[in-house]
Amino acid sequence: MAEVGASHNFGTSARRWLKPAAFVVALLPFAWWGYRALNGQLGANPIEATTRYFGDWALRFLLIALAVTPVRLLTKWNTIGRMRRMLGLFAFFYVTLHVMSYVGLDLFFDMQALLQEIVKRRYITVGMFALVILIALAATSTDAMIRKLGGKRWRGLHRLVYPAAIAGVIHYYMMVRAGFIEPLTYGLILAALFAVRILKRA
Ligand code: HEM
């Protein structure tokens, strides 16, 4: 009996602590960047290092958020489902920092230069495609918006997260100058996550 109680308590406290703990962990990459920025440890080209660093974390969080449902389906660990929205919003947080560091620090908010880059550089065009989708998903992530759109339409809209993630990987692939191992790895992880969903019909 005592054991049942103990495991119940563990389950409840895990449920209670999981989200705040994940929130703090998800902020660590940002804190690490802040620490290095304040200590002048971002290397010879800190703006490029910042853009790349946040781009990497944007893609990682996109994949982490996309991993929630497959992990839940494979393990039946339903509590993890509560973290999906938060992790998706962290992906959006890092994408925003990525784009702001490029548009703000690199282009000094010169919108004309940005438009030229979107037209001229294919990988920026592809990145913008992903960004527009992620803005729409973040804007409709609240409970009120889910109610307003209705479950079916909301789910349809949020399926666009896959094209956004694919575009994120292609964007990376198109700009990597040396090798393709990293974008390929992200692409394979994405394909595996998608395969689990298809096989489990989620
Ligand atoms: C979902 C959206 C996006 C994701 C996931 C993403 C992710 C990434 C990743 C992983 C990299 C490579 C980092 C590395 O080399 O380690 C990168 C590079 C870059 N991204 Fe994005 N990106 C996105 C959207 C955008 C947008 C909208 C823009 C511009 C408006 C942009 C501009 C850039 C630039 C300029 C670089 C090259 C940085 C440099 O080498 O100086 N990205 N991005």
Image: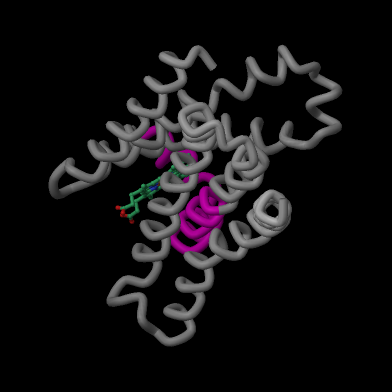
- Expressed as whole percent of the image width and height from the top left, the position of residue 101 reads 49, 59
Residue 58 shown left or right of residue 77 in the figure: left
Please tell me which residue is depicted at 71% across the width and 20% down the height of the picture: 154
- Expressed as whole percent of the image width and height from the top left, the position of residue 150 reads 80, 16
Position of residue 103 relative to residue 115, above or below, is below
12 vs 65, nearest the viewer: 12
Position of residue 60 relative to residue 125, above or below, is below
Where does the C terminus fall, quadrant-wise?
top right
Please tell me which residue is depicted at 66% across the width and 31% down the height of the picture: 136
Residue 54 falls in image quadrant:
bottom left
Name the outermost residue toward the front. Answer: 1
Please tell me which residue is depicted at 39% across the width and 84% down the height of the picture: 40
109 in magenta: yes
> Which SS does the magenta portion mostly show?
helix
Position of residue 145 relative to residue 9, above or below, is above
Please tell me which residue is depicted at 63% across the width and 44% down the height of the picture: 83
119 in magenta: yes
The magenta segment: 94-120
Name the outermost residue toward the bottom. Answer: 39
